[in-house]
Image (spheres, grey):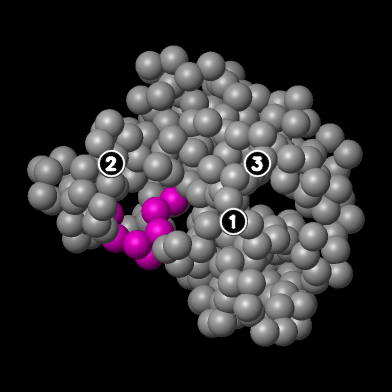
Amino acid sequence: MTAAQACPHTYFIAGTDTGIGKTFVTALLLRTAHLSGLRALGMKPVAAGVDAHGRNEDVQALVAASNVPMTDAVRADVNPFLYQAAVSPHIAAREEGRPVDLAAIAAARQRLAAQADVLLVEGVGGWRAPLSDTLDSADLACALQRPPMPVVLVVGLRLGCLNHALLTAEAIAARGLRLAGWLGNHIDPAMQRQADNVRYLQAQLQQAYGAPCLGLVPHVAGEAERGGPALDALAQRLLPRLRLPWLPEGVKMLPDAGFL
C-alpha cells in the first residue's frame, strides 16, 4: 500500500510569514479531522527553540492536536529535526552540526502516512525560510511530493497580507506545486477593511491558481491558542464554515468574507 492510499488527505501547510498562526491553524485543522471521526496527525519536520524540558512549543501543539497513538517511533517521525536555539533553522543547524536531511524527512513522512487518514505537514516560517545555506522551506515541500502533496496556505490577515499572499502563491506555483486552497487567520483585530481584503484574495487566488478560500479563522486569544477543550470548541464552531476535503459532507458553506 502506497502512502497516498494509506493517507488520502496529506497536505503541506505553508504560511505567508513567521508569526501568522500557522501552527495554531494546523492544530485547529487536525481537530476538525478528529471531530469528523478521522485519524489525524500533524508533522513538524524542522523546529528550532526548546523550553527547559527540551520541548518545542509548536511540536507540542501538533502532538496534542493529533489523535494517533504517539509511540516513541511516531513521535520521532513527527519532528525529525529539533534544534535548541530559537533562531532561524539554518543558523541552528550550522551551530549544532546537524544539517537538515530532506531524504530523512521524506522517509518519516511515508511512515506517518501509514498511521493516519489526514496528515498535515507544517513548514518552517514563510515559504522561503532558510533551512541551510542551500535549502529552504520551499525545497522541503518539493522533497515531499512522492506521492504529490498539495499546499494549503495560511494567510495572516493584517496590513500587507495581500502582497504577502500573492507573492507566496506565485512562488508556490513557480515550483510546480498545486495550491489546494488558503485559510485566512485574523491575527490583527484592528485590521481595517478586513472583508474587502478577503474578498480581493478570494477572487485573485481563485482566478490565478484555482485555489479557493477554505475558511476564515477569527481572532483568538487565550485558551483556544493553547489547545485542549477550547480548541475543540472552536473547531466545532467552525466546522459548518470550512471547505476541507476530509469533512464527510464535502464542500461547506463559507461566510461572505466575515468572521465568527
> Of the numbered discs in the image, which one, if any, rests on residue 194?
none
Q: Is residue 127 magenta?
A: yes
Q: Residues within 10 Å of mark 3 (few under 14, many from 20)?
A: many
- Mark 3 falls on what kind of element? helix
- On the image, the x and y values in percent for residue 59 come to 42, 38
Kindly identify which residue carries mark 3: 231
- On the image, the x and y values in percent for residue 99 come to 19, 44
Relative side of 242 to 178, left or right: right
Q: Residues within 10 Å of mark 2 (few under 14, many from 20)?
A: some
Q: Is residue 145 visible from the viewing direction of this image?
A: no
Q: Residue at x 72, y 84 (%)?
A: 193
Between circles 1 and 2, the one closer to the viewer is 1
- On the image, the x and y values in percent for residue 166 come to 57, 76
> Of the numbered discs in the image, which one, if any, rests on residue 50?
2
> Quarter of the image holding residue 35?
top right
Q: Residue at x 40, y 42 (%)?
A: 57
Q: Residue at x 35, y 40 (%)?
A: 56
Kindly identify which residue carries mark 1: 221
Segment tinted magenta in the rendering: 123-132
- Looking at this view, name the residue that lies furthest to the front: 222
Q: Residue at x 10, y 43 (%)?
A: 97
> Quarter of the image holding residue 189?
bottom right
Mark 1 vs 2, N-terminal side: 2
- Mark 1 falls on what kind of element? loop
Q: Quadrant of the C terminus?
A: bottom right
Between circles 3 and 1, the one closer to the viewer is 1
Real-space CA distance between mark 1 and mark 2, rounded to the nearest whole angstrom:
22 Å
